[in-house]
Image (spheres, rainbow, N blue to C red):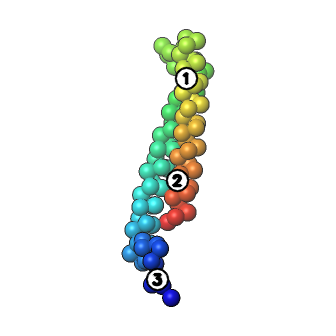
């Protein structure tokens, strides 16, 4: 019989607490980053619609649309990471 936790040294009580704390911190960080990406996406959507004074040319609107798409990808990536970290708490 082998010693407990030989293959997983961080799985003791202290290790579990440390891992949970790290996952909680990462969850908060990813959630904040996801909300930031969501806010940027909404701003870029308004620009794409031509609703931003001084930024309503075709090139500005295209830039807003591409920015909104990029922000949506970032938002989903951060939501996925946050969810994974939440499961590990």
**In the rendered image, the vertical position of residue 59 relative to residue 13, given as above or below:** above
**In the rendered image, the vertical position of residue 5 relative to residue 23, given as above or below:** below
- The alpha-carbon separation of the residues under discs 1 and 2 comes to 26 Å
Q: Which is nearer the N-term, disc 1 or disc 3?
A: 3
Query: Mark 3: few, some, or many residues within 10 Å (few <14, many ≥20)?
Result: few
Question: Residue 40 at x, y = what percent?
Answer: 50, 33
Helix, strand or loop for disc 2: helix
Image disc number at residue 9: none
Q: How many marks?
A: 3
Q: Quadrant of residue 24?
A: bottom left
Q: Which is nearer the N-term, disc 1 or disc 2?
A: 1
Which residue is disc 1 drawn over? 64
- The alpha-carbon separation of the residues under discs 3 and 2 comes to 31 Å
Question: Residue 77 at x, y = what percent?
Answer: 56, 44
Marks 1,2: beta carbons within 8 A? no
Closer to the camera, 53 or 25?
Answer: 25
Query: Mark 1: few, some, or many residues within 10 Å (few <14, many ≥20)?
Result: many
Helix, strand or loop for disc 3: loop
Judge whether residue 17 can be spotted in this image. no
Closer to the camera, 70 or 53?
Answer: 70
Question: Residue 62 at x, y = what percent?
Answer: 58, 18
Residue lying furthest bottom: 1
Residue at horizontal 51 percent and vertical 58 percent from the top: 85
**In the rendered image, the vertical position of residue 1 relative to residue 60, given as above or below:** below
Which residue is disc 3 drawn over? 4
Which is closer to the viewer, label 1 or label 3? 3
Query: Mark 2: few, some, or many residues within 10 Å (few <14, many ≥20)?
Result: many
Image disc number at residue 82: 2
């Amino acid at each position: 019989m082998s010693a407990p936790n030989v293959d997983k040294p961080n799985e003791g009580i202290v290790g579990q607490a440390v891992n949970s704390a790290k996952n909680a911190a990462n969850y908060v960080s990813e959630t904040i980053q996801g909300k930031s990406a969501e806010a940027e996406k909404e701003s870029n959507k308004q620009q794409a619609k031509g609703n931003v004074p001084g930024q309503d040319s075709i090139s500005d609107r295209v830039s807003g649309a591409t920015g909104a798409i990029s922000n949506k990808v970032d938002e989903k990536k951060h939501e996925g990471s946050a969810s994974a970290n939440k499961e590990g708490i």
